[in-house]
Image (spheres, rainbow, N blue to C red):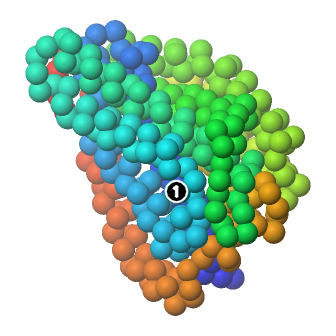
């Protein structure tokens, strides 16, 4: 039976997995507004395809941060203080993206729309890249001392391994977003999204393999959880191959599920590789943050568990209902603004 510390580690992992699965396609669609759309109407269609969902999807990230703060305050403090600058840029990118969704259609001017379209694009590229860098740092290790203080230099955070991790997450989100586009649009836009997704399969596969190989040689997570991680990576590879197959036979729903599974399995691998650690110290393994030395007291965890079990079904029910209500495809002829 799981202890409360283990339970909350699993819950934090599930929240991040849900965020990357759901907000991942939002990010991909945001990138597609510049990479796929050929006209302002098509950009509006793409924006409207995620219009009812993007803000609720971002709540998963806020909830994950809140769960970390409440269940593992030392993890939260070390992570957010050590990554202060990257997380500020992440926050600014998300704010700019959200504002752009609302403001781009307020003035009928080409230059006005270009500014906000740029905010949507960069606000969709930066968050998955920065989060990919942060997660790569977590498993690579950071200079954390015995007082749980992190004093990382630029190259501790930005190096070949973390950059590849960030790029891998960006490309996976783009692929995931393109498949979501095939589910929400029709006609030329749908066909070109499917075609672009197929063209991205090889470069995404190459990045995935490179990142997996670098993880094997540059981190210790395969030493800690080699068997489980191997199974997860094999499943991810199988999901990726099935995604490509379903794209070719135009089974878009299944292809979307497979690209989401790859993202989910990748994030799962990070948490499995870390467990029971939450942050790895590159100074001394004795300084690692774990689910035990970074956690709140037993009473706090107990109360939080009761609250989470009570409220979570309502939150999940509402989000499922919203996806059901807004499941219809978006057509160019509607010329909607969101």
Name the spot of residue 220 as percent of width and height, x first: 84, 52
Which residue is tagged 1? 80
Q: Position of residue 50 (x, y in %)?
A: 32, 36
State left or right for residue 258 relative to residue 120: right
- Relative depth, front residue between 328 and 118: 118
> Taking 249 as reference, is 208 above or below it?
below
Please state the horizontal and vertical placement of residue 218, each as a whole percent of the image: 83, 42
- Please name whichever residue, 166 or 184, is drawn nearer the observer in this view of the structure: 166
Q: Residue at x 55, y 35 (%)?
A: 129
Badge 1 marks a residue whose secondary structure is: helix
Residue 148 or 196: which is nearer the viewer? 148
The residue lying at 78 percent from left, 54 percent from top is 282
Quadrant position of residue 297: bottom right
35 relative to 96 in the view: left or right: right
Q: In screen coordinates, is 46 left or right of 334?
A: right
Indicate the quadrant where residue 117 lies: top left
| Residue at the image position 26 percent from the left and 16 percent from the top | 114
Give the class, few, some or many, for how many residues have Cα within 10 Å of label 1's Cα (few <14, many ≥20). Answer: some
């Amino acid at each position: 039976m799981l202890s409360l510390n283990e339970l909350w580690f699993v819950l934090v992992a599930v929240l991040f997995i849900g965020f990357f699965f759901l907000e991942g396609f939002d990010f991909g669609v945001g990138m597609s507004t510049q990479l796929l759309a050929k006209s302002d109407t098509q950009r509006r269609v793409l924006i409207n395809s995620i219009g009812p969902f993007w803000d609720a999807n971002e709540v998963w990230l806020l909830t994950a941060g809140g769960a970390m703060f409440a269940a593992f305050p030392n993890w939260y403090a070390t992570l957010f203080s050590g990554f202060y600058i990257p997380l500020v840029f992440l926050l600014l990118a998300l704010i700019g993206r959200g504002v752009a969704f609302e403001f781009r259609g307020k003035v009928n001017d080409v230059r006005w729309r270009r500014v906000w379209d740029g905010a949507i694009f960069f606000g969709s590229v930066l968050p998955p890249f920065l989060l990919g860098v942060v997660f790569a740092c977590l498993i690579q290790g950071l200079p954390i001392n015995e007082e749980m203080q992190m004093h990382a230099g630029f190259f501790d955070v930005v190096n070949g391994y973390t950059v590849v991790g960030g790029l891998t997450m960006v490309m996976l989100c783009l692929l995931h977003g393109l498949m979501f586009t095939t589910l929400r649009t029709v006609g030329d836009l749908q066909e070109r999204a499917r075609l672009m997704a197929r063209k991205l399969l090889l470069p995404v596969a190459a990045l995935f393999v490179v990142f997996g190989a670098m993880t094997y040689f540059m981190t210790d997570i395969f030493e800690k959880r080699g068997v489980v991680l191997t199974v997860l990576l094999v499943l991810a590879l199988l999901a990726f191959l099935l995604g490509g197959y379903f794209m070719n036979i135009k089974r878009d729903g299944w292809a979307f599920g497979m690209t989401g599974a790859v993202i989910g399995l990748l994030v799962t691998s990070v948490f499995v590789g870390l467990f029971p650690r939450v942050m790895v110290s590159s100074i001394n393994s004795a300084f690692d943050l774990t689910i035990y030395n970074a956690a709140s007291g037993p009473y706090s965890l107990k109360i939080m568990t009761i609250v989470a079990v009570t409220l979570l079904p309502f939150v999940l029910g509402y989000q499922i209902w919203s996806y059901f209500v807004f499941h219809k495809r978006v057509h160019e002829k509607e010329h909607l603004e969101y």
